[in-house]
Image (tube, grey):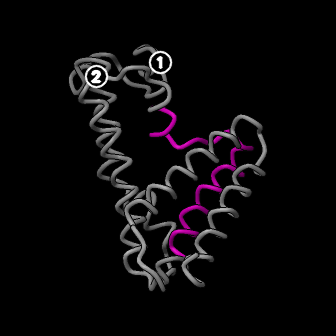
Amino acid sequence: TSMADVLRRAEVHGGSLYHFFPGKQDLLLAVLDFYITGIHQQLLEPAWEGVEDPIQRVWALLARYRSHIIATDCSYGCPIGSLALEIHEPDPPVRERLAANFENWTVAVKQCLDAAQWPVPVDTRRLAEFVLTTMEGAVMLTRTYRSIEPYDTAVTQLRDYFDRLLADGT
């Protein structure tokens, strides 16, 4: 995206934009910071409104992604995941903020998993990373095939895995 595209889309003059963001990277870092600080208000709170059960919160979060996918005719992608794939070799500040965004998402899911009652010991950190990886991969396949089926299949498999852990730990 060129700065001219940004200026046109934002409907601002160059001087105004450059006053706050001297360069393109400064704008990108500000956007990534916005996502880091806004995860609860923008993503988690709307998904979890009225959902108390910690495991159901995981499914509610995945359902929220699904609703975005459906609303965009399977063109929606996680903005952070898309950016991480798009940038071939991000510089350290960009990479750190991408990692911080994924970390926030993982920690939020881990907190849900920590609050759940598991019949066997569960590494909730790794399980939260597995949820994130499943979601990101499913979104990528859904966008590629322009079908919700890959997303639904992945979430169904993830739910089956959770059900097995919750039932008997196998």
- Dot 1 falls on a residue whose secondary structure is loop
Locate residue 102, reporting x and y percent: 38, 48
Q: Residue at x 58, y 72 (%)?
A: 162
**Image height of 149 relative to 57, above or below:** above
For badge 1, the amino acid type reads Thr
Q: Residue at x 58, y 75 (%)?
A: 170
Camera-side residue: 93 or 168?
168
Residue 162, labelled with which disc? none
Q: Is residue 74 magenta?
A: yes
**Image height of 45 relative to 105, above or below:** below
For badge 2, the amino acid type reads Asp
Residue extent of the magenta highlight: 56-83
Q: Residue at x 39, y 57 (%)?
A: 106
Mark toward the start of the polypeptide (1 vs 2): 1
Locate residue 111, reporting x and y percent: 36, 71
Please tell me whether mark 1 or mark 2 is closer to you in this view. 2
**Image-quadrant location for residue 89:** top left
Rounded to the nearest whole Å, what is the CA distance between mark 1 and mark 2?
Answer: 17 Å
Residue 91, labelled with which disc? 2
Q: Is residue 137 magenta?
A: no
Q: Report whether 65 appears left or right of 91.
A: right
Mark 2 closeness class: few <14, some 14–19, many ≥20 residues within 10 Å: few
* SS majority, magenta: helix
Q: Which residue is mark 1?
A: 1
